[in-house]
Image (cartoon, rainbow, N blue to C red):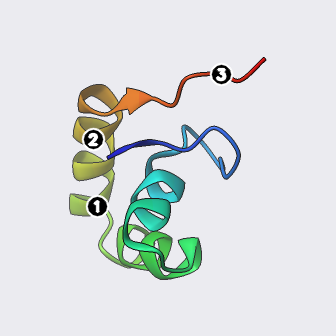
């Protein structure tokens, strides 16, 4: 699982999770938004743990 290079609202965490599972990024972003502040803490942890998708030339 990696951060998305194309579907980025902030850092690409939710877009990367959505690409990995083949679902809509909205369905991944919604729980993060609804579960503030816990969702924010999880988002920050995932942002630091997930690798960036390599840039294509």
Could you classify mark 1 by the number of other residues whose Cα lies within 10 Å: few (under 14), some (14-19), or many (20 or more)? Answer: some
Which sits in the foreground, 32 or 54?
54
Count how many numbered circles sit on residues in the image.
3
Could you tell which of marks 1 and 2 lies nearer the N-terminus? 1
Query: CA gap, disc 1 to disc 2?
Result: 10 Å
Residue 55 shows which numbered tag? 3
In this rendering, position of residue 6 left or right of residue 50: right
Which sits in the foreground, 20 or 49?
20
Could you tell which of marks 3 and 1 lies nearer the N-terminus? 1
Is the C terminus in the top left, top right, bottom left or bottom right quadrant?
Answer: top right
Residue 48 locus on image (x, y percent): 29, 26
Could you classify mark 3 by the number of other residues whose Cα lies within 10 Å: few (under 14), some (14-19), or many (20 or more)? Answer: few
Q: Residue at x 56, y 79 (%)?
A: 24
Depth check, mark 2 against mark 3: the one in front is 3
User: Which residue is farthest right?
Assistant: 57
User: Which residue is farthest top?
Assistant: 57
Which sits in the foreground, 17 or 9?
17
In this rendering, position of residue 34 left or right of residue 45: right
Q: For mark 2, give the secondary structure.
A: helix
Query: CA gap, disc 2 to disc 3?
Result: 20 Å
Q: Which residue is mark 2?
A: 46
Query: CA gap, disc 3 to disc 1?
Result: 28 Å
Depth check, mark 1 against mark 2: the one in front is 2
Q: Is residue 53 above or below residue 40?
A: above
Q: Is residue 24 above or below residue 33?
A: below
Q: Which residue is mark 1?
A: 39
Residue 4 sits in quarter: top right
Q: For mark 3, give the secondary structure.
A: loop
Could you classify mark 2 by the number of other residues whose Cα lies within 10 Å: few (under 14), some (14-19), or many (20 or more)? Answer: some
């Amino acid at each position: 699982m990696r951060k998305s290079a194309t579907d980025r609202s902030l850092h690409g965490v939710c877009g990367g999770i959505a690409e990995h599972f083949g679902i809509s990024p909205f369905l991944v972003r919604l729980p993060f938004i609804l579960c503030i502040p816990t969702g924010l803490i999880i988002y920050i942890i995932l942002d630091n743990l997930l690798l960036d998708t390599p840039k294509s030339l």
